[in-house]
Amino acid sequence: MPALDSFDVVVVGGGWGGLATGALLAHRGARVLLLESRGACGGRASYQERDGFLLDYGIHAHRFGKAGEAAALYEALGEKLDLVTPRRGTVFHRGKHHAVRHKPYQVALSGVVSTREKAALASALRGLAARDPAKLWDVPLARMIPLSAGADSRRLISALSGFGLISEDLNTTSAGEFAAFLRKAARSRFLISFPRGGCHQHVRRLSALIARSGEVRTGTRVRGVTVESGVVGGVDCADGRVSAGVVVLALPAPAAARLVGEGVLADSSREKMSKIVPTAGLTWEVGLARPVSEADTAFCTDPLIIGAFPSNFDHLLAPPGKQLATFCMPLPLSAFDDPDGLRREASALRRKAFHMFGRLEENILWERAMKLPMIDGAVPSVSQPWPARPGLVADGVEGLFLAGDTVGVPGQGGDVAFRSALECAPLVMDYLG
């Protein structure tokens, strides 16, 4: 196979993990080639324009605003991330809206639970935040909830876990992962923020940083990683081979494992990579002729629906006088094995959104529904908390590294991708010498 070119590093995958890792490496002087199989970068954080609306591929929030992983990445690049922060939230519980601030303890003190339960619920959350997460990775969150907690308190904790971790099942969610989330939330001024202009900002800025000393190629499918005598030599693409001293696979771990030939990775590494289960669910996005709510964010406790009116706090996302609404219903990946059941869930999502916001249906200009078998790379469950996930260095192959939101670094949701870049790039630079 003819050699196309030679680079210091080839990054495979143009989602947040690949873009962030590539930008950091380029910033530190490496000549980087980023390869993305689709026609544009972004991956599960891609975007599109529609009738003056700027749409992300579902909701993509950053936990903890300026104290979060995305902001830390831009600081490492010598850049400033432009964030917008929602202020007004609403919780829809038992048919009523309850105004809340974006802090877990403020949610606990809202009108969602009875006066009698408020103090006990707030105490339970603070107690969990005080625990050492390392001792709770394989403990189900349900086991950490006091037996005295009522149904409303349990539903609210489930909703908070769904909101923060995209994992609402109390019997499978890692108490350690939830405790780590609560601990960081307690120290942070903001629970969530969004990149101004949506994911467009990340794709545009990080791609430009890579291109200063390297290259971004879209529409290029990688067929496999070349390995000789246990050392990476580059990647094979449809039109030739690219040589490189390092390959970073910034892909979902199962897909990354498939690009490396059988018998190359250490068995333990391949097993971890192959068994990762993602979060999944349904999204429904709506362009509205006029505003139907002043809320910035909204979530329903039963069924769990995470919603936002992002154009309320980021006016770049909708034309003047119009409004963008987006809703997400997390579901287990197993739900995608039942197409009829999935259609019922999609109908339930739509009906509940109409119930939550009475003027929604009459003001719809367009709508987009999507079935997402992968929202975030890994469910934060007792079987795969972050310490049990694949490491940044692929065992068994010199010069092969992993990045993205399925690797074993701390964090929640898509922000894991940024944390992986912050930890992966120094390892790569040390390897390159």
Image (spheres, rainbow, N blue to C red):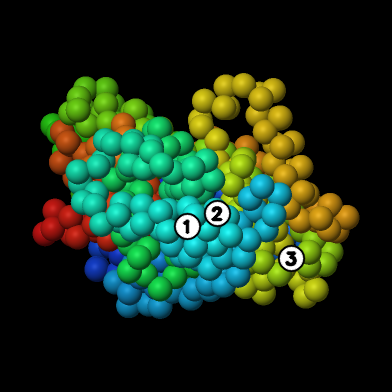
Of 291 and 257, the residue lying toward us: 291
The kind of residue tagged 2 is: Ser
C-beta proximity under 8 Å, tags 2 and 1: yes
Q: Are marks 1 and 3 in contact (CB under 8 Å)?
A: no
Mark 1 and mark 3 lie on one chain; the one further toward the N terminus is 1
Q: Secondary structure at mark 1?
A: helix
Q: Amino acid at mark 1?
A: Lys
Say which quadrant the C terminus sits in.
bottom left
- Give me the residue at 15% from left, 41% from top: 398
Q: Residues within 10 Å of mark 2 (few under 14, many from 20)?
A: some
Circle 1 sits on which residue? Answer: 118
Between residue 95 and residue 242, name the one nearer to us.
Answer: 95
x, y percent for residue 244 = 25, 48
User: Disc 3 vs disc 2: which is toward the camera?
Assistant: 2
Estimate the spatial distance between the alpha carbons at disc 3 and disc 2, rounded to whole Å: 26 Å
Mark before the other along the chain sequence, 3 or 2? 2
Quickly name the residue at label 3: 293
Above or below — where is 146 with respect to 65? above
> Mark 3, residues whose alpha carbon is within 10 Å: few (<14), some, or many (≥20)?
some
**The N terminus: image quadrant:** top left
Q: Quadrant of residue 229?
A: top left
Residue 161 pos. (x, y %):
45, 47
Q: Nearer the viewer, residue 2 or 372?
A: 372
Mark identifier at residue 114: 2
Q: Residues within 10 Å of mark 1 (few under 14, many from 20)?
A: some
Q: Are marks 3 and 2 in contact (CB under 8 Å)?
A: no
Q: Secondary structure at mark 3?
A: loop
